[in-house]
Image (cartoon, grey):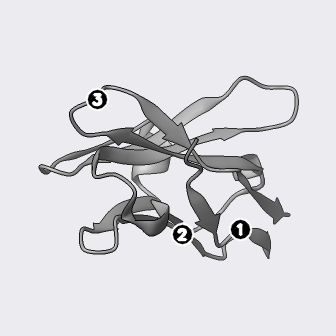
Amino acid sequence: QVQLVESGGGLVQAGESLRLSCTVPGRTFSPSAMGWYRQAPGKEREFVAALRWSGGSEYGTEAVKDRFTISRDRVKNTVYLQMNSLKPEDTAVYYCFANRAGWGDRYWGQGTQVTVSS
C-alpha cells in the first residue's frame, strides 16, 4: 500500500503563511489528480483543493480560494498547497490524496497538523 509523503505543517500565528507539499513516493504511480482535505477536531473531513494533472483546479470554498493556491511539479509528482493569511479556523490536520491514473483508486498521506494561533 502506497502512502503519500506530506510535509510543511506547523504552528503559525494568524495572518502568516505555510506551504504544504505532498509527493507520490518513488514515482510508484502517475496521478490523474492530487489534492487536500482537512479535518478539524470534532468536525468531518472537509475538501480543500484539488488539481487535475491534465489541467484545472478546484477549491472547496470561496474563503479558501481567496487565500490558498494549489500547484504541482509534474516531474516530481508533487503537489503544493500555499496557504496565506491563515486564520485560527484553518487549524486542522491536512490530508493529501492522489488519484491513480487509469485505475480509479485513491491514496492518502499520513496527515500533517496545521495550527494557527490568534
Badge 3 crowding class, 10 Å Cα cut-off, few under 14, some 14 to 19, many 20 or more, is few
* Label total for image: 3
Residue 87 falls in image quadrant? bottom right
Residue 8 falls left or right of residue 64 = right
Q: Alpha carbon of mark 1 to alpha carbon of mark 3: how far?
A: 30 Å
Residue 112: horizontal and vertical position, in percent? 72, 58
Q: Which comes sooner in the sequence, label 1 or label 2?
A: 1
- Residue at image point 78% right, 71% down: 10
List the residue tagged with mark 3: 103
Question: Which marked residue is nearer to the observer: mark 1 or mark 3?
Answer: 3
Q: Is residue 8 above or below residue 86?
A: below
Residue 9's tag is 1
- Residue at image point 25% right, 74% down: 75
Question: Which marked residue is nearer to the observer: mark 2 or mark 3?
Answer: 3
Q: Tell me whether circle 1 and circle 3 mark residues in contact (CB < 8 Å).
A: no
Q: Alpha carbon of mark 1 to alpha carbon of mark 2: how far?
A: 13 Å
List the residue tagged with mark 2: 84
Q: Is mark 3 on a helix, strand or loop?
A: loop
Badge 2 crowding class, 10 Å Cα cut-off, few under 14, some 14 to 19, many 20 or more, is some
Amino acid on which the number 3 mark rests in the picture: Trp
Residue 69: horizontal and vertical position, in percent? 39, 62
